[in-house]
Amino acid sequence: MEYFGEIDLNYSKIGIGTLKSEFYQFNGFFDKNFPEGYGKEICNKIIYEGNFKQGLYDGYGILSFPNGRVYKGFFNKHMFHGQGELIGDEGNKYEGIWNQGILLEGKIVYVDGSFYKGTIKNNFLKNGIGSKFYYREQGVYIGNFLNNLRHGEGTFLYDNGSKFEGKWENNEFKQGNYHLKIENEEYFLNSGFWINKIKKGIEQRYFFQEKGLYKGEFLNGKMNGFGIFKYANGNVYEGQWKDNLFQGDGIFYFKPQDQFRKGDVYNGQFQKGKFQGFGCYLNNKQNKYFIGKNYKLQIYFLFYLICRFLGK
């Protein structure tokens, strides 16, 4: 390595200097040959800028990796230690109190807008008591987690007032009390009503996990044929089913209170529970229509005329 900077009478690096080689460079302060105090280090494209102590990251600093991962916070002997925030290469953000490189307690913000607060174990697993806001379901769970799953006593609250309170196992609601608010209807039930006793039938009410209320046809204990599913969060699906999934023609209504899809409607084909095939999509917020496969063909005016004609 080459060194450019200040030295003492014993030729030890001290004061401001630069130490570099083909894959390494440090610019900053030295004391007794080691980086000490503030400096910037680049090693194999990994960049650290912050405080050093006897050559190790110690105190506040920012560590950036080539894959996009960034940590901002406190270090102790090269380890994340104390208050800090890590932005993962997948886009999730982990912030809270760290101990020797492990996040013990804090907050995880996911790329889809969901977030979790509570106790955390190795590999950022949710374990113990905590709360998580679910963006897609528009609700929050408060209670016990085990290996990232809702497990033990807990309560799931939807923003429309629906509530599931009781015992959970591996993310599924098993036993407790339910208060469902769907459109202008309310249901107060206990876990004795949760058991699936319907094997085949038409126009029957049936609860499916913690998601909501189903009314329609069954085959071999699964939703098959025509049926209406009113979700606990306010969304509604009306159409064809196959083995508990949307399959064929149907209409999906997003609840009016949805943050981004306020009152949007999709009318078309479904494959294995997803919008897939030919259909039309009404963007209620922008007052625009989409027509085509997977509503990617945005022929607004033509579709508007078609919808107006069909609606007469």
Image (spheres, rainbow, N blue to C red):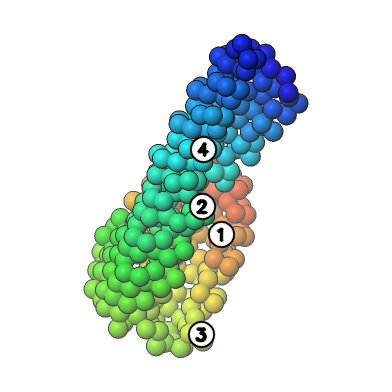
Residue identified by numbered label 2 = 281
Farthest front residue in view: 10
Residue 133 point in image, percent of width and height: 37, 53
Image position of 1 with respect to 172: above or below: above
In space, the residues marked 2 and 4 are separated at their CA atoms by: 55 Å
Instruction: Tell me the amino acid under the disc marked 3.
Output: Leu
Q: Quadrant of the N terminus?
A: top right
Is the C-beta separation of discs 3 and 2 under 8 Å?
Answer: no
- From the image, tell me which residue sits under label 4: 77
CB atoms at circles 1 and 4 under 8 Å apart? Answer: no
Element class at badge 2:
strand
Q: Do the residues labelled 1 and 2 touch (CB within 8 Å)?
A: yes
The image position of residue 197, as x and y in percent, is 39, 88
Q: Which numbered disc, 3 or 2, marks the residue closer to the eye?
A: 3
Between 175 and 120, the one nearer to me in the picture: 120
Q: What distance separates the C-alpha of mark 1 from that of mark 3?
A: 23 Å
Residue 133 seen by the camera = no
**Residue that appears at 45% across and 56% down:** 121
Categorize mark 1 by other alpha carbons within 10 Å: few (<14), some (14-19), many (20+): many
Q: Do the residues labelled 2 and 4 touch (CB within 8 Å)?
A: no
Give the Cα separation between the discs numbered 1 and 4: 51 Å
- Disc 1 marks which amino acid? Phe
The kind of residue on which mark 2 rests is Tyr
Q: Which of 76 and 165 is in front in this view?
A: 76
The residue where tag 1 is placed is 275
